[in-house]
Amino acid sequence: MRRYPVPLYTLLVNALVVVLAAALGLTVSAQQAQAASVTVQAESNSAQSGVTLEGTADTGGGQNAAFLSDGDWMRFDNVDLDGAGRLTVSARIASAAGTGTVELRTADLTGPLLAVIPVSQTGGWQNWATRTTEVTTHPTGSQTVFAVLRSTTPNDFVNINWFSFVGAGDAAAAGWVPIDQAKWNAQLAEFRAMTPAAVPAGVVRVPEFNATCTYSHSKPDDPIVLPGLPGASHMHSFFGNKSTDAFSTTQSLLASTPTSCTPANDLSAYWIPTLYEHNTAVEPEGMIVYYGSRLPDPSVTVPFPQGFRMIAGSAKTQTPTPAGSPGQFWCAGEGGEIGRSADGNWPLCAPKAHLTHQLVFPDCWDGKNLDSPDHKSHVAFTYDGKCSGAYPVAIPNLSFVTSYPTSGSAEGFQLASGMASSIHGDFFNAWDNAALGHRVKDCINQKAKCSSAGTF
């Protein structure tokens, strides 16, 4: 893997953070825990029935309990469920067939029910999604927890990578950002009171509008993953709000008017890892941020709440991307792709075609949190055309389409995060509520294609 020079100030900042953390006895980038925050790997079970272990396909995923069916179970000893109060229970699952639930029970196989985690298809046995449920009352302290698989499907229906248990006092430290319910209710009321614009004849009936953005700036910052730590990230290329840096908040974005996007009342921040060719940064020609819907009934879609944030893709994914790989870079324009880089991971474009990528975000939300510890657990992809269970709220299906002014070469490219497979994107919402609401109401709810101006 090719390495790119790290700015001196990045090294100094990182060193200072580590030194201060050591001196104060802190864990870097985490607050002191006020309650239990426990992740239990599926392979760490103390006893089981019907469970086979296998390696996950994604880098850093470790092992998973594979091809589980009705009646299979796992036992986990000494799981700290913290004190009384809310407990957030999550499981990282993958499923290519069937549906069912994971029952979590304490003490024994038929003991008190702790939580029920719904299982629906995620699109493959290694297509991972996090399912979350909230528990209001539960046994406290160290417990024996049984995971019992239930399904009416006679065959295998789920793989499990891990479980997590986050106590109420630790939610903020762990990265959960609960929504201000009063503000959200007011935003929803304003949205529902809007009268949709009449759709003229001849409009393409596709639920979609967009923000058309030019490149703004680059910084080794990430206000979602590494807030308040300038220079602590790999290099990112930013679009939209021109003030975006490591210290950006909802309030700072809303207070900063310059944006590289049309319309001007979209003050959101969008960013992706910087692309390098021959050790030189290649900044995009532009990015179109599409807001759409994949649901058969897009009328149930509601706007993003202000301050909402999420990530699609993963910087940790470092796997080959040969031709035909899902989500790969491609060539847009005359002549298209005419070959591959020497390592096979990047397309080689015709002289009049440009390197392009489309990154798709989840479209269902838990309705409770603006963010989550991994910046993904509060959202999920729909695979059955509905948003339900732990993710009942349909949000616009966001996607970044990015075009680069290069055709490539046999040497290929490198992302600041590594291989082509490490492409990822961040979204920090700072739309004007009325502007976003009217676009969702007019364009997505009515299944009508709109421009950046929000008009038909």
Image (tube, helix red, strand yellow):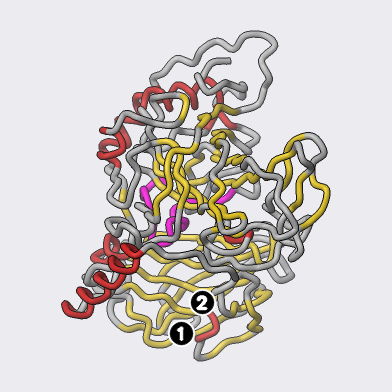
Q: Main secondary structure of the magenta part?
A: loop
Residue 40, position as x, y percentages in the image:
45, 78
Q: Magenta stretch?
A: 367-381
Q: x, y (%) of residue 44?
A: 50, 86
Instruction: Decide: is 189 above or below 138.
Output: above
The label on residue 368 is none
Q: Is residue 110 visible?
A: no
Three-letter residue code for mark 1 = Phe
Bin the neighbour count of mark 1 within 10 Å (Cα to Cα): few under 14, some 14-19, many 20 and up: many
- Residue 37 in percent (x, y) is at 33, 72
**Circles 2 and 1: CB distance less than 8 Å?**
yes
SS at mark 1 in the image: strand
- Vertical arrangement, residue 120 with respect to residue 146, above or below: above
Task: Please state which amino acid type lies under the numbered disc 2.
Answer: Ala
Judge whether residue 377 is colored magenta. yes
Question: Which residue does the numbered mark 1 point to in the structure image?
Answer: 76
Q: How many marks?
A: 2
Q: Quadrant of the C terminus?
A: top right
